[in-house]
Image (cartoon, grey):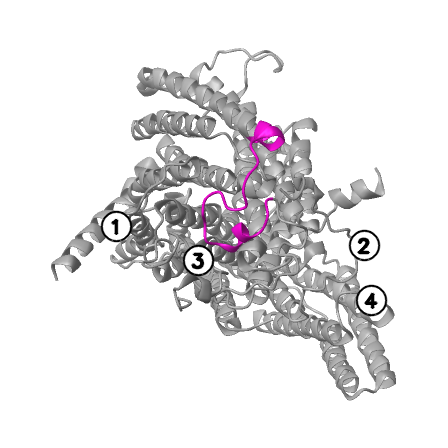
Amino acid sequence: MKKLAIIATICIAILAMAAPHAAGQGCAMCYQNAAASGAKGQEALRHGIMILLIPALALFGGIVAAIYRRDNFSQ
Amino acid sequence: MSGNWMSSTALTTESAEPGIPQRVYPTGMILTLGAILMFFMALFSAWVVRKGLSTSPLEAPISLPWRLLSLNTALLFASSGALEASRRFLRAGDTAKFRIWWCAATILGVAFLVGQFEAWRELEGQGIYFASNPDASFFFLFTGAHALHLIGGIAGLLIIALKPLRQLTRNTATRIAAIYWHFLTLIWASIFLLLIFAK
Amino acid sequence: MSARGAARLFSTDHKVIGLQYLFLSLIAVTTGMILSLLMRYHLAWPAGRLPFITGGIMTPEQYLALVTMHGTIMVFFVLTTAPQNAFGTYFLPLQIGAREMAFPVLNMLGFWLTSAAFIVLLAAFFVQGGAPISGWTAYPPLSGLGDITGPGEGMGQTLWIVSILIFCVASVISSINFIATTIEMRASGMKMMRMPLTVWAWFITSILILLSFSVLLAAGVLLLLDRSFGTSFFVPAGLVVTGQLQSHSGGSPLLWQHLFWFFGHPEVYIAILPGMGVTSQLLSNFSRKPVFGYPAMVVTLSAIGVLGFSVWGHHMFVSGMSPYSGFTFSVLTMSIAVPSAAKTFNWIGTLWGGKIQFRTPMLFALGFVSIFITGGLSGIFLAQPAVDNMLHATYFVVAHLHLVMGVAAIFGVFAATYYWFPKMFGRVMNETLGKLHFWLTFAGAYAIFVPMHFLGIAGGIRRYADDSGAAYLVGLQPLHAFMTVAAFCTAAVQLIFFWNFFASMKSGAPATPNPWDATTLEWAVPSPPPPDNFGSTKITVYRGPYEYSVPGAPADFIPQNLPPTTTGDGGFPA
């Protein structure tokens, strides 16, 4: 239990310390531009995001699944 | 030390790599389709986002040559069907029928392209060009991008018909050509549906 | 050129192609570095004269052209090319026990397309108007209207776009090769959870490349159409440029950002993931300990990949009037910190209790961890929208991105170079020069970029050629001078590396096949490897990639392909 507490503390400390480029270079600008584009614009952006994100994530998952399935093959 | 690092060469004219299994080609083709899918999704996303963000006054919707586009759609589906029939004959060992149906698929593909050119000509006849208005731009963009990929597909079909590929067996070559072709048919179907629902 | 020469130049051997990529990236990094030194010179001494500029003093537009080309060259031709294409092309097949990649001809094509893209990009310097000034992000309408918006925006910008389009095609081709090879061409026994973390990193990075560069390709095509065919994908109506009303209508500059950053976010992870893989490999090798939490390392690599896409969505995703949307946005943006922190924790866990060997590759791997943490810390600040409002477009961002991408990622490249040099060239690099190179570069990098954070907080704006006119920044001009001197010194230090690299290639001490007593498959073959990698031996893998200091084993490492009967480890199932 004590070991777990130590590990958890170190994890949280590092979590608080070590994070990379979580923000893109245009972070605030994108967000504010998007916020300023009106209801129709925001909805369009949301849909536009989904159109790119869903196939991308599906393909990502598919490729990882493919290597999982190919496991244990022998030449 | 087995020699200078520059001495590792493999001549490009060498015969098929012995260690490369046939299964890499369908995998490679599917991955290629993943990339192409993302490309078309980017165009789709661009269309949706631009429409929502545009502050221009209502753009005049363009009237599309629906009859021609529907005919083209039928031609492309027919070519996919022909391609599948051809592969079935190849699997059954009937080389002659395989060739006939493979040619039919190619010709139907070319017919589709001719139909697409006609559709563009019809629009241009109405004074609607690529840059006329954003809706027109996207129409030409979607159909143009699809047509370009299809031209590549037709080139592939011709190459397979005319000249055996060194590294690929005929089964593999026809399989990956079919995967590519059917994918493009699906892409066209999606574009067609998009055009219908966008009206 | 003789037939043999042509065969070598257009070789389809992945090892040759890997080296070709490495040399291309060395040329690119030298070019990019020179450009940055010109920028730093001007920032420190805005009135300073340069011999090759008409009028002597750099104009703001010329400065922006340097900014654009430096960024483009470094991001694309160094950070996407060296960690992934140079070392991945060379070592992926070796590490998975394959004779070749899945598509050798496409491999060769990918390299030559990348080289063509580089030449096209450099050509922008030499056309009328010069190089583009819209930054590596090429935002329209600045980039979308042709030379009416500024010098370099004519032919220069067109060449830039064409170069990037060629690069996109080359990258996608190479990613298809990597993924297909990793899935289909592993040796017997090389299960996915026995792959070295370098292979996992190259694999995940390839997926990111496959998915994101396709979208950049689409965006670039649309931009080209706007410029050359009068379309209005990105250009809105009513724009007046230099007194002339533009005829475009219906486009949106925000659309470009939407498309570009779908690529742009994964791109920074593409730049860093291979370095993380190399770091895991090296920390394990030189601590004589297995990687702490190998499964977690695989999961975190994948998580960073997935979240890299999702984070993009959150930057643009505005949920409307909900007061919680900002909170959700912020939390989800920071979620990518979780796997990165887990990796850092596991690296420390790998080192803990190990018999650490402070060889040059290890120093650079440790340096990677150090700088990744430092650079990452500043990322946390930028992830808060309120703080980012203040720090956006300041030197704080520049400092952050250079620490993670310009230093950490490059340290990953250095680490990989020193580590794999014996294998690639059959010779050993000079250890003393290596250590000197490390310590001076480590100190120099911090000297350049730590002060830059303060400049940013004080309000120093990025992309401005000359801060000296702003009253509130005049007092900080000495900081610019300090950073410039540090930059010049650090750049000079790289000469040590270049000397070491090329001299050792020619006359370094001969290397044994496995100078680092490493476990992965590339060390089981001669240095350099023969054309077909493993000769007539059929490679079988019996265990995981980091079996170091296994209790009861005869040596403190067990190569992956050593049959279990000779090692007494019963063929560990991991």
**Nearest to viewer (mark 2 / mark 3):** 3
Q: Which residues are magenta?
A: C501-527
**Nearest to viewer (mark 4 / mark 2):** 2
Is label 3 in a helix, a strand or a loop?
Answer: loop
In this view, the residue in front, B74 or B105, is B105
Percent across and percent down for residue C308 are: 42, 54
Asked if marks 4 and 3 fall on the same chain, the answer is: no
- Whether residue C319 appears in this view of the structure is no
Answer whether labels 1 and 3 touch (C-beta < 8 Å): no
B67 on left or right of C401: right
- Where does label 2 land, which residue? B13
Q: CA distance from mark 4 to mark 1?
A: 56 Å
Label ID, residue C512: none
Q: CA distance from mark 1 to mark 3?
A: 27 Å
Q: Quadrant of residue B70?
A: bottom right
Label ID, residue B159: 4
State yes or no: residue C49 in magenta: no
Percent across and percent down for residue C394 are: 37, 32
- Chain letter behind tag 1: A
Q: Which residue is drawn at the image coordinates 39% and 21% (left, top)?
A: C483
Q: Amino acid at mark 1?
A: Leu
Q: Which residue is drawn at the image coordinates 48% and 54% (left, top)?
A: C520
**Nearest to viewer (mark 4 / mark 3):** 3
Answer whether labels 2 and 3 touch (C-beta < 8 Å): no
**Nearest to viewer (mark 1 / mark 3):** 3
Q: Amino acid at mark 4?
A: Ile
Percent across and percent down for residue C195 are: 47, 60
**Nearest to viewer (mark 2 / mark 1):** 2
- Where does label 1 land, which residue? A15
Reading the chain from its start, which is encountered first: label 4 or label 2? 2
Q: Amino acid at mark 2?
A: Thr
Instruction: Report crowding for label 4: few under 14, some 14 to 19, many 20 or more residues within 10 A (C-alpha).
Output: few
